[in-house]
Image: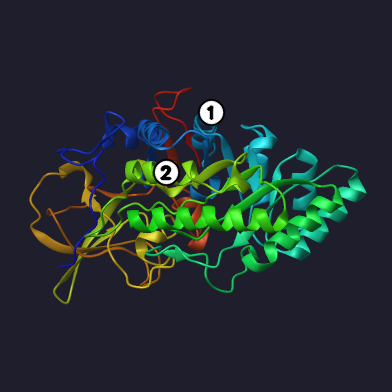
Amino acid sequence: MKPIGPIPPDFSGQSRLTIAGREVAGWIEEAGSTPLFIYDFSIIASRVARLRAALPAGVDLHYAIKANPFAPLVRALAPLVDGLDVASAGELRQALGVKQAGTISFAGPGKRDAELEDAILAGATINLESEGEAARALAIGDRTGVTPRLAVRVNPDFELRGSGMRMGGRASPFGVDADRAAALVGTIRSSGADWRGFHIFAGSQSLDTQAIIETQAATLALAARLANDAGAQPPLVNLGGGFGIPYFAGDTPVDVETIGAALGDALASRDDALAASRFAIELGRWLVGEAGVYLTRVIDCKQSQGETFLVVDGGLHHQLAASGNFGTVVRRNYPVALANRLDAPATETVSVVGCLCTPLDRLADKVALPEAHPGDVIAIFLAGAYGLSASPVNFLSHPVPAQILAGSPDNPNAIFTS
């Protein structure tokens, strides 16, 4: 038997799984079938409120759309945050539909000229990943007669300790190396473009509160050094994010109140080079990840050489991360439960496998669950971030699952898409 991660507090302690005050069976009936994703917007709104209370004044909150681009979710969340961070022309178009262009930033390597032009004409900020990208953006500004809004994404000379994905302290396709960033700021300013500041992202999915505090302090020091070298105060310093959520056994949540207090102290004593700067925290997973549940129905209970397999109608084509095939080095189990008997004692060890023709399609490996039967519903938690949109949904041409935003401000019942 292998351990599973902790069920998020909003769903623990129930006998039958309820989401936004409604039992799973009711949501499935309304959707018409399994598998499906349900996102409880009240959890997301609560996360935003908690973080707002923890952050010091002068720190904006941005949502990174890549974490979950489900249109009703983005539309509901947009009024609660100060900005949206996008990473493609498609995300840019979506963001422009719900937020003013001046609050949108566009990051990511390999932006095509057409994408750069779209952002420039719209008035969004481009987080430049290289000197070459800067030259292309400036050329597009000259050709169109529109002043580009340009920030410099910096590849920092440090990393976020304990992060699941390190984004600094090494050679990287992301951002301009710290020792060249100030020179690029000079080029941008001398060209007449609108320099919008720095974007400094050192890593993601860290559960180490102290490491996040230290990284934010190092980010402020780096931004100050670069501002002094460039001879200009950045209008905005995007401090990145990196706040993780507890996916696996033994994981503990980050303490955002302690992080916010430490950031307040760091800002109070910041270098004069940043005296007039605003700051932003960019988060995706921490805001939406724990609000989502993936529901999939047991089709078959199979015995093979002494092992039990619960074969379900979903799989890695919807929840790649839960299968361990989304960058995980060692395969570990997400929190998983039998939705209709959440508090029943675990009586058997099973593996939950999907409907795809590949041995990689395993949503839970040798976990303890109550005895399950065909027709029972398996819940995979922490499905609110990097779920459907980060999975190979077209693999084997199975139907696209429904998604539901439960408890949204404009529709408290449900919103569907397929």
Q: What residue is shown at x 52% (from left), y 66% (from top)?
A: 168
Residue 104, how many percent across, how many down? 64, 40
Q: What residue is shown at x 45% (from left), y 64% (from top)?
A: 165
User: Which numbered disc, 1 or 2, marks the residue that appears first in the sequence?
Assistant: 1
Up/down of 267 relative to 392, above or below: above
Residue 133, how many percent across, how many down? 76, 61
Q: Is residue 134 left or right of residue 270?
A: right
**Circle 2 residue:** 265
Q: Is residue 143 left or right of residue 404?
A: right
Residue 152's label in the rendered image is none
- Could you give the CA–CA distance between mark 1 and mark 2, rounded to whole angstroms? 28 Å
Up/down of 131 relative to 416, above or below: below
- Is the residue under label 2 in contact with that under label 1 (CB below 8 Å)? no
Quarter of the image with the N terminus is: bottom left
Q: Secondary structure at mark 2?
A: helix
Of the residues shown, which amino acid type is indicated by label 1?
Pro
Of the residues shown, which amino acid type is indicated by label 2?
Asp
Up/down of 173 relative to 318, above or below: below
In terms of depth relative to the viewer, which is nearer, 307 or 62?
A: 62
Q: Secondary structure at mark 1?
A: helix
**Circle 1 residue:** 79
In terms of depth relative to the viewer, which is nearer, 242 or 84?
A: 242
